[in-house]
Amino acid sequence: MNIEPTNLFAVLAHDTRLRCLMLLHSHGELCVCELTQAIGQVQPHISRHLALLREAGLVADRRDGLWIYYRLHPELPEWVMEVLRATAGEAGNLEPFSRDLLVLAEMPNRPGAPKCA
């Protein structure tokens, strides 16, 4: 997988995409509804940014019934993973990233329950 640094940083420059990546980095795999809840944006907004992340090669997705789950692409180059690790390490205690983690932890009806929030 070949990701150009200029493309990576252009994708990371948007707060919604960076917030999605930080949540995926910390949780491994999340449903679109979990990302929507954590970030506090409507589903079409989150889905549009997830599509851009997928097109850039940063995330992979899978469908499971009604839900679409996203995760960091398993074939990301090590240098990209290091950028994400370093960013997560610094951003984890800052707003809005810390709030995203808290909102997700408190989310009712997470996937696997009868109805997704």
Image: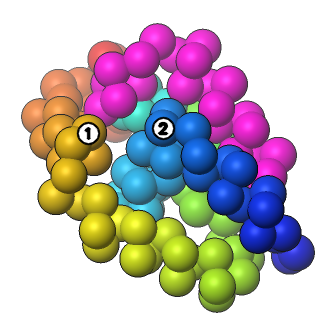
Q: Where's the C terminus, which quadrant? A: top left
The alpha-carbon separation of the residues under discs 1 and 2 comes to: 9 Å
Packing grade of label 2 (10 A; few <14, some 14-19, many >=20) is few
Task: Please state if 60 lies on the left or on the right of 85 as rendered.
Answer: right
Which amino acid does the dot numbered 2 rest on? Asp
Above-or-below relation of 31 to 93? above
Secondary structure beneath disc 1? loop
Which amino acid does the dot numbered 1 rest on? Pro
Q: Position of residue 89 (x, y in %)?
A: 30, 72
Which residue in the protein does label 2 denote? Answer: 15
Q: Where's the N terminus, which quadrant? A: bottom right
Task: Please state if 104 lies on the left or on the right of 50 as rendered.
Answer: left
Q: Position of residue 35 (x, y in %)?
A: 41, 34
Q: Splitting the image into 4 quarters, where does residue 73 fall?
A: bottom right
Q: Position of residue 23 (x, y in %)?
A: 38, 51
Q: Main secondary structure of the magenta part?
A: helix
Which region shows up in magenta? 36-57
Q: Which mark is residue 58?
A: none
Residue 48, magenta (yes or no): yes
Question: Viewer-proximal residue, 10 or 50?
Answer: 10
Packing grade of label 1 (10 A; few <14, some 14-19, many >=20) is some
At x 20%, y 52%, the residue is 94
Q: Position of residue 100 (x, y in %)?
A: 25, 39
Residue 104 visible in the shown view: yes
Q: Which of the marked residues, 1 or 2, is nearer the chain's N terminus?
A: 2
At x 64%, y 87%, the residue is 78
Which residue in the protein does label 1 denote? Answer: 96
Task: Please state if 22 lies on the left or on the right of 104 as rendered.
Answer: right
Residue 51, magenta (yes or no): yes
Above-or-below relation of 37 to 26? above
